[in-house]
Image: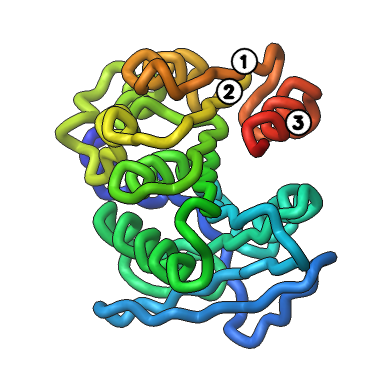
């Protein structure tokens, strides 16, 4: 029964969205445009595109597994402060976004926004940034496109790897519908890669990120260790802030 529950309830375990009314009005500290796209299968995707004068480039930000743009838009302002335009989307069922979840849909929706940026920016200006859940999506995009750089905050080797650490006594690999094999994607990334992870992360084990680093292209990948950092407080650490600033130069 426990095994069956893991299979049928896995989306409720993996994804923790909050929703917003369709007429909700966002309010942030920087100028932004709210975007609404419709996919071929009828999903509606909501995003925030921060725009500043004379940006250093554009960051396409893929957020974690909880919350919505009300939270993640505020978090993304960290990069606007550093003189970057930022585009952050809500996944299906998050915030104002709608549609059926699937691993393929995550990838296709991400490419949709990447293609949107290609019409407005040179590809050499695009930085892909993934946080937690979003790291697998960002790495997938980087493996299929040619962005300027890829930055991964609290990434995982694969979702199967994380699930094994959570449920060591269950056959999680055949049960998981969402594999997110970041370790496969990262081997095909040609741009510079930065991985940053806290040693006290109790959501995605530090060793999962180290394993990812071991299979990443060595000549273009750096690993930033945040001693004592956990899953949600890396921004409080100087190692994180200086590491991100260095990676964006």
**Which x, y percent locates residue 136?**
39, 40
Given the current orientation, which residue lies at the most extreme bottom position? Answer: 23
The structure's colour scheme is rainbow
Give the residue pinned by disc 2.
197
Is 135 on the left or on the right of 8, as rendered? right
Earlier sequence position, callout 3 versus callout 2: 2
State the separation of the CA atoms marked 3 and 2: 12 Å
Mark found first going from the N terminus, 1 or 2 = 2
Q: CA distance from mark 3 to mark 1?
A: 12 Å
Residue 30 in which image quadrant: bottom right
Is residue 167 at all visible to an observer of this figure? no
Mark 3 or mark 2, whichever is nearer to me: 3
Task: Tell me what residue is drawn at x 35 percent, y 35 percent.
Answer: 190
Q: Nearer the viewer, residue 121 or 173?
A: 121
Q: Judge from the rendering whether residue 61 lies leftward or rightward of residue 136; answer left or right.
A: right
| Mark 3 residue element | helix
The front one of 91 and 109 is: 109
Label 1: state its secondary structure.
strand
74 above or below 33? above
Q: Which residue is mark 1?
A: 225
Residue at the spot 70% in from the left edge and 68% down from the top edge? 51
Q: Is residue 159 visible?
A: yes
Few, some or many C-alpha atoms within 10 Å of disc 1 (few <14, some 14-19, many ≥20)? some
Front in this rendered view, residue 209 or 84: 84
Give residue 241's mark: 3
């Amino acid at each position: 029964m426990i095994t069956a529950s893991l299979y049928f309830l896995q989306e409720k375990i993996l994804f923790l969205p909050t929703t917003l009314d369709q007429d909700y009005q966002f309010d942030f500290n920087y100028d932004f445009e709210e975007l609404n796209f419709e996919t071929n299968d009828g999903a509606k995707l909501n995003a925030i595109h921060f725009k500043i004068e004379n940006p250093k480039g554009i960051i396409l930000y893929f957020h974690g597994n909880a919350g919505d743009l009300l939270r993640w838009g505020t978090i993304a302002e960290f990069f606007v402060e550093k003189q970057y335009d930022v585009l952050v989307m809500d996944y299906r069922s998050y915030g104002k976004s709608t549609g059926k979840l699937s691993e393929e849909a995550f990838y296709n929706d991400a490419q949709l926004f990447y293609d949107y940026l290609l019409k407005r920016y040179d590809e050499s200006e695009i930085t892909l940034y993934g946080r937690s859940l979003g790291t697998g999506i960002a790495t997938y995009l980087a493996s299929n496109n040619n962005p300027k750089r890829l930055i991964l905050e609290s990434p995982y080797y694969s979702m199967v790897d994380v699930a094994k650490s959570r449920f060591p006594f269950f056959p999680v690999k055949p049960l998981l519908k969402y594999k997110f094999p970041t370790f496969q994607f990262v081997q095909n990334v040609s741009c510079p890669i930065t991985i940053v992870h806290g040693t006290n992360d109790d959501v995605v084990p530090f060793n999962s990120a180290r394993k990812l680093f071991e299979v990443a292209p060595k000549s273009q990948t750096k690993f930033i260790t945040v001693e004592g950092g956990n899953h949600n407080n890396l921004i409080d650490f100087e190692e994180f802030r200086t590491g991100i600033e260095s990676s964006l130069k």
